[in-house]
Image (cartoon, grey):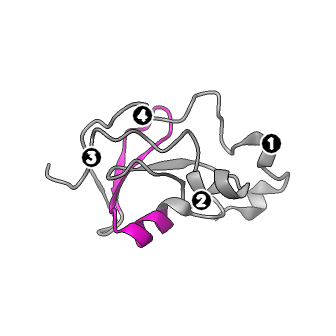
Amino acid sequence: MSIDVDTTVPPSGTGCAECDADGGWWVHLRRCAHCGHVGCCDTSPAQHATAHWRETGHRYMRSFEPGEDWWWDYADGVPVDGPPLAPPEARPDAQRPPAPRDRVPENWRDLIH
């Protein structure tokens, strides 16, 4: 498969970069296969992974959840296959969604998409 990814770049962190910066929280995490940016999924209130694609044009992402290895092409809106990426391949197992626990409101289910 010939897609524009960088298999050497590590993830930007263990959580959504923007949520961590602004005190937000997320449901699941997605990793940009081009630059390693970790953002929150579209179920999450802020949807930072999709926002990253819109801002950068980096169209391919991989799930950053333990046990998941699926890829997504934002531009075409379809699943794709991709190569292994630099470790770690997922958030820490102990960081259960939604996360981080100390920032998740009690009514979090009412706030997701």
Label 4, label 1: how far apart the Cα atoms are: 24 Å
Say what amino acid the circle numbered 3 marks: Asp
Label 3, label 2: how far apart the Cα atoms are: 26 Å
Q: Seen from this angle, which residue lies furthest right?
A: 106
Q: Is residue 41 left or right of residue 77?
A: right
Question: Does the CB distance between marks 3 and 2 fall below 8 Å?
Answer: no
Per the image, the residue denoted by label 4 is: 89
Q: Mark number for residue 43?
A: 2
Label 3, label 4: how far apart the Cα atoms are: 14 Å
Q: Quadrant for the C terminus, please.
A: bottom right
Local SS, label 4: loop
Q: Is residue 56 left or right of residue 1?
A: right
Does label 1 or label 3 sit earlier along the sequence? Answer: 3
Residue 100, position in %: x, y? 71, 42
Which portion, as a residue range, is magenta?
A: 50-73
Q: Seen from this angle, which residue lies furthest top?
A: 94
The image quarter in which residue 44 lies: bottom right
Q: Nearer the viewer, mark 1 or mark 3?
A: 3
The image quarter in which residue 84 lies: top left
Residue 55, position in %: x, y? 43, 71
Per the image, the residue denoted by label 3 is: 6
**Magenta stretch encompasses residue 35:** no
Q: Mark number for residue 25?
A: none
Q: Is residue 34 above or below residue 87?
A: below
Count neighbours of disc 2 (C-alpha within 10 A) and say few if under 14, some if 14 to 19, many if 20 or more: some
Per the image, the residue denoted by label 1 is: 102
Q: Is residue 49 above or below residue 29?
A: below
Label 1, label 3: how far apart the Cα atoms are: 33 Å
The residue at 46%/64% (across/down) is: 52
